[in-house]
Amino acid sequence: MPGAPPAAQPEGPSRRELNKAATREAITDAALTLLRSNGPGNFTVEDIADAAGISRRTFFNYFGSTEAAIASVTHGFLDNALQQFRLRPAGESFMESARAALVELAEPMAVAPIAELYSLGQANPQLGRSELEAWDHCTEQIIEAARERFAPGTEIDELYLRALAGSVIACGRAAMDLWLARCGGDLTAGSLATLRQLLIDSMSLLGSGFASPDAAPAPPVTPATTSPERH
């Protein structure tokens, strides 16, 4: 008897989706280039559109302002961390999964974009507000990711979820603040490695209930084993 037909492979993104992603990336890259060369607040939507090779109308199909285009970089990093979180084993504790998600972002340069924008946002109120909105958006996503850990029909303590998500974000921002105070916004590999470790350590502190620094260190993270379907 002939064997069973092979399982259908999941379809990849369509050409339209790829084109949209490429346009979005071009806008973001142009915005960051102008941010570095001109400084916050010293360029317009038209400048970004010209640098990205698109129309002003196309820009507004993706972003509502120059600040939103820049803040999308922070959204991207936080979304990536959440994606890593969702790949962790279901039975693992929430905080261990959060810490492991940051460990999975192995290259220190992975935190460079949010480090750069966080530093610039301290000196530019409008950019700082966009950055804060990105972190607030992540808070809501963390709540949903935590909710997914519960079995269907389980009664969930909403206060627990919201306090947990808020604490994760507060610890992340505390790590960013400490890095900025210690390293002054330096974006060298060594400085970014320090930031990455501070982010990981902040999750360890929260997971331990802010145990004394003399307490035993957190155990090493076991990499998640995931099937191809989960990617």
Image (cartoon, rainbow, N blue to C red):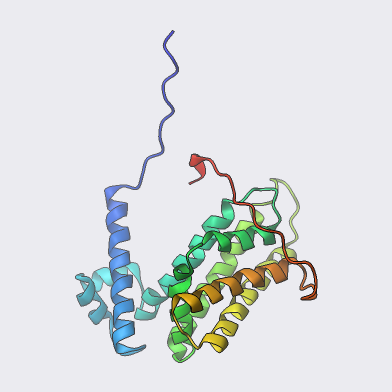
Position in image of residue 175 (x %, y %): 60, 78
Q: Residue furthest top?
A: 1
Of 144 and 38, the residue lying toward us: 38
Left or right: 42 in relation to 78: left
Q: Residue furthest bottom?
A: 123
Of 49 and 227, the residue lying toward us: 227
Residue at 49% across, 40% down: 229
Residue at 44% across, 70% down: 109
Vertically, is 187 above or below 124? above
Position in image of residue 20 (x %, y %): 30, 59
Q: How many numbered marks appear?
A: 0
Vertically, is 223 above or below 190? above
Residue at 61% across, 73% down: 169
Screen quadrant of the N terminus = top left
Left or right: 131 in relation to 223: left
Left or right: 132 in relation to 8: right
Position in image of residue 190 (x %, y %): 49, 76
**Picture quadrant of residue 220:** bottom right
Left or right: 230 in relation to 63: right
Vertically, is 130 above or below 1? below
Position in image of residue 193 (x %, y %): 52, 73
